Image (cartoon, grey):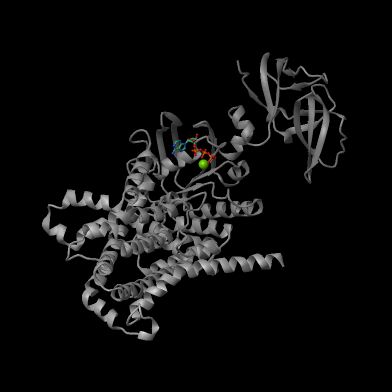
Amino acid sequence: MGLRWTTLAGFAITALIALFLVVPVLLSVYAGLSVNYARGISAGFTLDWVRQVWSLYSDTVWRSLIVALMTLALTLLIGVPGAYALVRRGGRFARIVEELVTLPVAIPGLALALALILAYGGFGAFRQSTLFVVVGHVLFTLPFMMRAVIAILETIDWRTLDEGAASLGSPAWLRFFDVILPNVRPGIVAGALTVVTLSIGEFNLTWMLHTPMTKTLPVGLADAYASMRLEVASAYTLVFLIMVIPLLIGLQLAADLTEKRTKS
Amino acid sequence: MNARAEAFTRCGSAITTNALTKTFHGHTVLQPTHLEIASGEILVLLGPSGCGKTTLLRLIAGLEQPDGPNMIRFDGEDVSALPIEKRNVGMVFQSYALFPNMTVAENVGYGLKVKGIRRKQRESETKRLLALVGLEDYADRRITTVSGGQRQRTALARALAIKPRVLLLDEPLAALDAVLRERLRVEIGLLLREFGITAVYVTHDQAEAMAIGDRIAVMQRGRIEQIGAPKAIYHRPANDFVADFVGTMNRLEGRVSDGILAVDAEHTQARLRVGGGDRSAVVCFRPEVARLTAGPGAIRARVIATTFFGATQRLVAEVAPGRQLQLDLASSLHFAPGQIVAFDADPQAIIEFEKDA
Ligand SMILES: Nc1ncnc2c1ncn2[C@@H]1O[C@H](COP(=O)(O)OP(=O)(O)OP(=O)(O)O)[C@@H](O)[C@H]1O
Ligand SMILES: [Mg+2]
């Protein structure tokens, strides 16, 4: 009986916390769909605000997606071989590089952005392009990809796998693709989910880096909150949710699928 | 089995090492080593943990760089500068190093795939190898779902698939239980002979070494102490270390006069006929060469314990407190602890070492 009581209490507490977190989001969704939030349900519901947001800000939605995907591509390209190279090298040097790569996470986004602008602000075309935002995101998300891959590498006997493949005549680059990559896939998937999530939601850094032509969704959101009526800003949140939730579920499903294919 | 293996049979390369040396961080792990391994020969590297067996094997494989150039030759060709992927050596690792992302068949076929061999030919080749090691029914199983013995066979088939010039095995049976180890030891020995491949086989199990090797190299502290046929190593060990490491060896120390070794022991009459002139000597003999005798020149010892082995029994007896000998005698005889036994050893089978200064 005692067990049952504590189980119930645990369940109740979890439900309360979930509610506490979800209610504001639901309220936001409600506000974005209501004709007039102040007047309540009696005023009725509309999709006008969503439509208005879409016409004003649809470019930020696409840009956010593109930035997230480019960031993901770059962190995969740099982070996965980089993590393997670091683990292979080992020793003090590798530790120091790992710390250095992690540094941008600890530095406030604003400071990091300022540093980027100071360094590369002079290159007009680059400064004006979406690529500038992507570079900021890569700096910020790279350590998450690398850490995830390093964590898996430390659990598999990569050296023996590599030597085994080498003894069968496989050159170094092929060994990386044939026996290292498939066996660190769980780390890559975890890293990819983190990178995409972080990139899509990133505001600090992006706010400093963006130009009127390179606004991402969270920056547009801030704009809307500052300058539009509450219902429009809330409708924007709704758009954000509609975009992010299927994206994350899709990524997770894709990851599960590849996982299953290698396991079965 | 011969017919099946015939398709693969070719002779492997002869291996020569010339003052092969390896130093890690200023610490010489392998002393200058000269080895001549004939084509098709199976050489076993035997020695205690940390003596450098794996290091020597990895040097031959190309997984470690020797200290100097021109130290390793395959069929006279200097391969010192070639990395492992260019040496065409088959390697069976202690942990097998199988690829968990591939099936049994994919593991075996990987080397062929890397060589760019067509899928059709690859598959039939893989099939033949799997049949050879008795794994036909497991071809499509994930590596993670087969047993230890099956993994071991997969690793062997995978290494043989590339038709290597030499096959290198690092304690391939160490991870298996005793029964399986004994069975696979026989299987591997047969298979290697059928293939007629040059093989270097590392182990620290002397029974395994005896069963598999054409020759055995006994190593200690980075040095080969003795190299020779199993029987020679067993019956004519070059020194104390080899004698002790390969099988059980009894040791008696004392003065020889008139061809009789007198051991200063409690139970008096500890005398053994060894022949030769007067000298101080260390005399060794295996348990199985002991024979009961009542005549003069016999050793008398007190029985401490007996262990029944079937046809024989092993007696532990002491000539003086703490100085024990082991004797294998017919199990039909009866001995009680505390009893005094009188025995000598076949003079032909007695080994004598110089007494250390
Ligand atoms: N990469 C390395 N760096 C430094 N020292 C090493 C390295 N590899 C081996 N050694 C040292 O060389 C010596 C011989 O090692 P090796 O692995 O060859 O022994 P082994 O005979 O195979 O022993 P075991 O039976 O335990 O496997 C050991 O003292 C070991 O510590
Ligand atoms: Mg070893």
Q: Quadrant of residue B333?
A: top right
Residue A246 pos. (x, y %): 37, 74
Residue B286 pos. (x, y %): 70, 33
Q: Is residue A114 left or right of residue B86?
A: left
Instruction: Please say whether residue B16 is visible from this viewpoint.
Output: yes
Report the residue at 47% width, 65% height from top. Answer: B103
Residue A211 pos. (x, y %): 18, 62
Q: Is residue B330 above or below residue A262?
A: above
Q: Residue furthest front?
A: A39
Report the residue at 76% width, 25% height from top. Answer: B322
Q: Quadrant of residue A208?
A: bottom left
Report the residue at 44% width, 59% height from top. Answer: B161
Q: Is residue A176 above or below residue B35?
A: below
Q: Is residue B35 left or right of residue B135?
A: left
Instruction: Please say whether residue A264 is visible from this viewpoint.
Output: no
Split into 4 quadrants, where in the image is the N terminus of chain B?
bottom right
Split into 4 quadrants, where in the image is the C terminus of chain B?
top right
Q: Is residue B314 left or right of residue B72?
A: right
Q: Is residue A50 above or below residue B256?
A: below
Q: Quadrant of residue B74?
A: top left
